[in-house]
Amino acid sequence: LNLPDRERSVLLERLGTEIFDLLVIGGGITGVGIARDAALRGLKVALVDKADFAAGTSSKSSKLVHGGLRYLEHAKFRLVFEGTHERAVLGRVAPHLVRPLEFLMPTYRGDPWGLFALDVGLWLYDALSKFSSPRIHRTLRKKRTLQLEPSLRSDDLTGGILYYDSMTSDARLTIENMLDARRLGATVLNYVIVAGLLRRSDRVVGAELRDVLDERAPVFPIRARVVVNAAGPWSDSVRRLADDPPILAVTKGVHLVVDRPRLPITHAIVMRQDRRVIFCIPWERRTVIGTTDTYYDGNFEEVSADSSDVRYLLEVVNRYFPNAKLIASDVLATWAGLRPLIRPQARAATASDISREHVILSRPGVVTIAGGKLTTYRRIAAEVVDEVGEQLHGISRSSTKDRPLPGGSGLKSWMLTKLIDELQPAVDPDVAAHLVNTYGVRAASVTSRIAADLVLGARLDPELPHLLAEVDVAVLEESAECLDDVLERRVPLLLLARDQGLDASEQVAARMATLLGWSEARRQAELEKYRTVVALSRRFQRS
Ligand SMILES: Cc1cc2nc3c(=O)[nH]c(=O)nc-3n(C[C@H](O)[C@H](O)[C@H](O)COP(=O)(O)OP(=O)(O)OC[C@H]3O[C@@H](n4cnc5c(N)ncnc54)[C@H](O)[C@@H]3O)c2cc1C
């Protein structure tokens, strides 16, 4: 047995034999945040996910850590305050992953909100964030707006507002929380499904688990004093296991990726359509456009962008950037995710009208957390663990606010440039920037692997800075089990490479086969599965 296999079987054994204070169902950002918080408070924690960490909504977001400017329109001041506060906390504990990004909101004659009203709103936004942005917002005249973003439509343009929010990698943020939960002693496993709940009279006392990677593996029990349902959009199916009623209204959100030269923006652009906000976001060598918000009742395992989603988003972009003339064939990749929103009492007018606030529901032995945002996961996790503490009759206070994530250990945002410089000339400048902005201080683990074996310094795609050594890190340090765990969430060529990583997939699969001892049949099956993932991302071409 190689190392990861051995580790996995030890962890599986532990799940089946020990008694835990807390079992968390779901390894999205909410679940791993809860596991980390609880382990830091001294609880004995287990977490399982039926797929990979962040395979659900937590790799499908707009990747913004933000107060949510649009919530001001609905007078949701607390939501904005919490979001901007968390933006500052996360920028401190993970400065490599949560970085400020400048947003430009152009204003046009006939817009619902003019420049003056927006200026007032942004003063409020800055104030609610306690002026923690790198700069307070600025109001621009038309000429300056066009100097900053020359490809914007100039007809009827009245000016623009510049302000800051933050951008992250949602999947990486999830993985770093998972790693820290493990460091703190939690037993955390992907590809283990909760197939049932164990009950003693009215109280839930554990769950039935099954190893998804081993077809012949039997269902086995895990015992836990409290179970947290953090299954995101799947929360209702877990609630069904406890005979609890459904609470969710699920909506779909789609993003498109186009090549940066096709939409050469240098700021995140805030666009308005149908009382909604849609962003164009510069992302590495690409531009991301999103998102949609429509009710969804299809198959949760096969969510994808369809042609009407793509048409809708391209229409909005082409209205703001008429010379771009984007068409469906410009779309290199798409991703689609499900928002686990709380079903409103009365049916909301549109999907976008449903509140983004979370709820925590508690009954003996089970706590359900549903709703919420990526941005506020740490705060939500603390609230959930407080609730778990109630059931356990006492617990210490959350202290995740002051604990860096693994890549942010000892790191301050001003050190990032120095760290990037230090990696050169051993690696190219773009590679150095990518490694530091992805792994923070853990970048040293990638470079030391290359120092030990120069072959690992090869790029996976000639246009991109991702290296073969990162596959080793993904498998040996970050529990990647399947090919798409690497190519979709840890080294996301699926979204960044022109061919969505199809070319590199052979090399990555070969490396994973060596590290994980895959048979030839398993290697082929992984490649086939990855082609299905790529096809899902391109399904809009056929719908
Ligand atoms: C399009 C879109 C854009 C968004 N943009 C932003 C944004 O920019 N900023 C922001 O702050 N928020 C944003 N959000 C919201 C944010 O992404 C979500 O709130 C967050 O990711 C939810 O995480 P979660 O852990 O609750 O759910 P998930 O990430 O879906 O995790 C749930 C996990 O539970 C697992 N699971 C389910 N059933 C079982 C079972 N029976 N056994 C074991 N495991 C199980 C699943 O495999 C899954 O991994 C966006 C959401 C969407 C959809």
Image: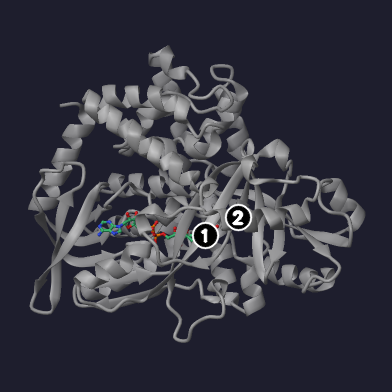
Q: Position of residue 169 (x, y in %)?
A: 51, 46
Q: Is residue 438 above or below residue 519?
A: below
Residue that sits furthest to the bottom in the current view: 346
Q: Which type of secondary structure does the marked residue at label 2 adopt? A: strand
Residue at the spot x=17%, y=44% of the render?
Answer: 11
Separation of disc 1 and disc 2 at Cα? 8 Å
Q: Is residue 493 above or below residue 343?
A: above
Q: How is the image coloured?
A: one colour
Residue that sits furthest to the front in the current view: 542
In the figure, residue 397 lies in which quadrant? bottom left
Q: Is residue 104 visible?
A: yes
Determine if the C-beta at disc 2 is less than 8 A from ligand 1. Answer: yes
Asked whether 267 or 412 is in front, the reply is 267
Q: Position of residue 321 (x, y in %)?
A: 78, 51
Q: Is residue 58 above or below residue 272?
A: above
**Ligand 1 appears in which quadrant?**
bottom left
Give me the disc on residue 290: 2
Residue at the spot x=23%, y=32% of the render?
Answer: 4
For the residue carrying disc 1, how many other residues have a C-alpha within 10 Å: few (<14), some (14-19), or many (20+)?
many
Say whether marks 1 and 2 touch (CB < 8 Å): yes
Task: Identify which amino acid the numbered label 2 is placed on.
Answer: Gly
Q: Is residue 224 visible?
A: no
The disc, 1 or 2, on the residue closer to the chain's N-terminal end is 1
Q: Which type of secondary structure does the marked residue at label 1 adopt? A: strand
Residue that sits furthest to the top in the current view: 454
